[in-house]
Image (tube, helix red, strand yellow):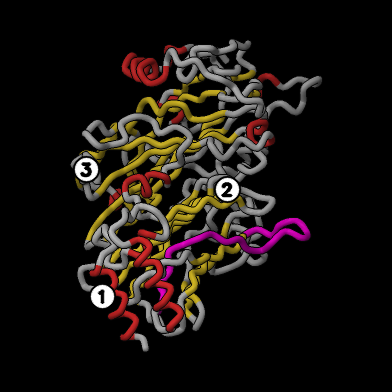
Amino acid sequence: MKRTAGVLSVASLVVLAGQAAGQTCVFPPIGPDVIVGVLHDISNSGTDTVAGVSYDSFSLGTTSCNLGNVPVQWYNDGDVTSSQPDIANKHPAIAQSAYRYTFSGGAGRFEQIGQSFLKHGFLALSNTACCSNCSSTDGNTLGVGCSDPYSATRNSGQSNSGPKFQVNAHSGVFPYPVPYSGAPSYTTNTGRRLRIKTTDLVATTGGSAATTRYFGEGQYVCYDDAQAGNNNNNASFREVAVSGSGTAFNFSFASAAGSYNTTQRQKSAIRAWKEIDPRVMQTEIQAPNEGFFILDSRAYLLPSGMWRYEYALYNMNSDRGAGSFTIPVSQNVSVSNIGFHDVDYHSGDGVSATGANWSTYDGTDWPSTKNDMAISWGTAQNFATNQGANAIRWGNTFNFRFDTNVMPSFLNQSAVMGFFKPGMPGDPATFTGAAVTPQVSASVGELFAYLDQWFTYFNLPVNTDPARFTDVNQDNAVNTGDLFYFLDQWFANQ
């Protein structure tokens, strides 16, 4: 299939040239390493109403770059021959996601609000969006240092896009050509595309002080990149401006001062939350024998004196996924306003309870439970009961939240996540990550521990752990106000 650079607009080519052209790259001996080098244009796809719900959609143009020292395989279905029967799935699949940051009532949150089917790559060009020293190839591979653009319009193609459920993002394995037998029909404008509920959209004002901000993310999954262990850097994000109202919106790249108006290479969108708010605790988790997760958490002191705890768990490429999330909470801590947020699959992307293809994954919210030791959320049904249950699959972020009158500990606590799919014999059923948790200050040991931290960090910057957790009244300084606040909590819980 013939491809040329002409699929990109003049404006897109200017962006490509302006962001990284002319840079001489050094290629470490790590094998093939594909990244999203540039998110370069946006295509507005229009709206649909499905089952009484209004949706809007857009698509992102993606330019991939190979930063490894070995070409990345880029074959398409037409390249398959009797002598090369196994190359049809040796190309990238391109996913797109949308996120929203909001700050309201004294607390912030970062949520995924949309995702797309996958564009399957074919015929790599040998452009220089990331590196000037590109080693050109015949198009069946992406050469070392080379880049390959896909326009937003091309990435928004519906008839030739494939579902996410068939792809193992940890291993890079997927069937190809896509078996469309049994594939359901899709809506005209938003089907299979990056679809967002219009109730999740508002017009943005722009800039770093905005209380609502949107982000688009592109991610590549590629077999040889994954097999080389280079698939934890395959996503990049860029800020998106939204205009319009009601059920009609328009999407463009943000340009206001303080916005992320260029591609944030090798950064999944979840990274933006901590960059917006340095107080967010961000924990990278390489799950045992499995994929990569990021856990973000933040405790906000609300104007009412209550504390809001916000958590976001992002699964970049784990095939087992996550089916439960647990935060340690002491038995004396009462919680309220327990919340949960997920992202919808659509257009038949998923399997049924018995594993049958083309049945949109279940979207049932995770119920929560509170006992003397913890608060937990989990799928309503496990994998053995329902293979299509609502799990945190690759490219997904789920959110968990609650309120309490108890401040966070200045010590890092561990959240416990349970895998959704079973692993191989001997594989663990759970994994952990550091998270902000509430802590009842009731013991003498806790008092002395806090005093030691308070004297250590008094009048010092609070942008590092554990200094920022010593700043319990969140006035951006470790001072006497924190000591009095802690003592009030400590005496109240005696």
The amino acid on which the numbered mark 3 sits, given as a three-letter code, is Thr
Is residue 234 at least partly visible in the picture? yes
Mark 2 and mark 1: Cα distance apart in space: 40 Å
Mark toward the viewer: 3 or 2: 2
For marks 1 and 3, give the one nearer the viewer. 1
> Residue drawn at (26%, 57%), measured in percent from left and top?
476
Q: In which quadrant of the rendered view does residue 105 lie?
A: bottom left
Give the residue at mark 2. Answer: 292
Q: Quadrant of the N terminus?
A: top right
Is the C-beta separation of discs 3 and 2 under 8 Å?
Answer: no
The residue indicated by pointer 1 is 484
First along the sequence among labels 3 and 2: 3
| Residue at 34%, 15% in the rendered image | 14
> Which residue appears at 56% of the width and 52% of the height?
285
Characterize the magenta stretch by its predominant secondary structure.
loop
Q: Nearer the viewer, residue 381 or 411?
A: 411
CA neighbours of label 2 inside 10 A, class few (<14), some (14 to 19), many (20+): many
Q: Which residue is mark 3?
A: 204
Q: Give how far apart the Cα atoms at labels 3 and 2 are.
A: 32 Å
Which numbered marker is on residue 318?
none
Provide the residue span drawn in magenta: 420-440
Residue 81, compared with residue 460, is above or below; it is above
User: Magenta stretch: residue 118 in it?
Assistant: no
Furthest toward the front, the residue is 455
| Secondary element type, mark 3 | loop
Of discs 2 and 1, which sits in the foreground? 1
41 is higher (above) or lower (below) than 23 = below
Three-letter code, disc 1: Phe
Query: How far across and down, in percent of the image, does residue 33 sit?
Result: 60, 29
Q: Nearer the viewer, residue 395 or 21?
A: 21
